[in-house]
Amino acid sequence: MVGDLHASVQALKDRSPSGVLVGSGTLATELDRLELIDEYKFLMHPMIAGHGPTLYQRGLPRTRHLDLISVEPLSNGVVTMHFRRTA
């Protein structure tokens, strides 16, 4: 992407009706700050590391409220959770 992040990502979203997958906490933080994330899909692993990075290391300007779309337990103990931002 070149230039304005908001304009570039919005153009990408407009060209990708099935969505854009982001796996970077740093990029996700910036996209969330620009209110460009519509849905979240999280994987919850059955362990607590006790250390390491968080999803939003630099925080967000305000709390995000989410609506639960679906939850699916997988055979390996991982749980997938799908949320949509509350309007």
Image (cartoon, rainbow, N blue to C red):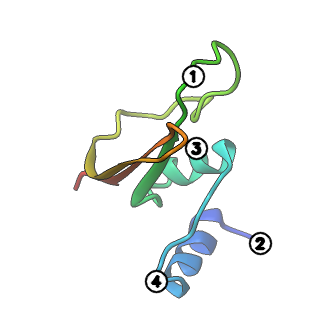
Give the residue displayed 35% in from the left and 33% down from the top.
Answer: 63
Residue occupied by mark 1 = 47
Residue occupied by mark 3 = 29
Lower position in the chain sequence, tag 2 or tag 3? 2
Residue 30 percent location from the top left of the image: 59, 48
Regarding mark 1 in the picture, which secondary structure is present there?
Answer: loop
Give the residue displayed 65% in from the left and 52% down from the top.
Answer: 23
Front label number (2 vs 4): 4
Residue 16 percent location from the top left of the image: 53, 83
Mark 3 and mark 1 residues within 8 Å of each other at the beta carbon:
no
Lower position in the chain sequence, tag 2 or tag 4? 2
Q: To which quarter of the image does residue 21 belong?
A: bottom right
In the rendered image, the vertical position of residue 52 relative to residue 11, given as above or below: above
Q: Nearer the viewer, residue 79 or 86?
A: 79
Label 4 Cα neighbours within 10 Å, binned few <14 / some 14-19 / many ≥20: few
Residue 71 horizontal side relative to residue 36, left or right: left
Quadrant in the picture for the C terminus: bottom left
Lower position in the chain sequence, tag 3 or tag 4? 4
Front label number (2 vs 1): 1
Regarding mark 4 in the picture, which secondary structure is present there?
Answer: loop
The residues bearing labels 3 and 1 have C-alpha atoms spaced at a distance of 24 Å
Give the residue displayed 70% in from the left and 22% down from the top.
Answer: 52
Mark 2 and mark 3 residues within 8 Å of each other at the beta carbon:
no
| Mark number, residue 17 | 4
Residue 58 percent location from the top left of the image: 61, 29
Residue occupied by mark 2 = 2
The residues bearing labels 2 and 4 have C-alpha atoms spaced at a distance of 21 Å
Q: In the image, what residue type sits under mark 2?
A: Val
In the rendered image, the vertical position of residue 26 relative to residue 14, given as above or below: above
Lower position in the chain sequence, tag 1 or tag 4? 4
Task: Report the residue that reaches farthest toward the right.
Answer: 2
Q: In the image, what residue type sits under mark 3?
A: Thr
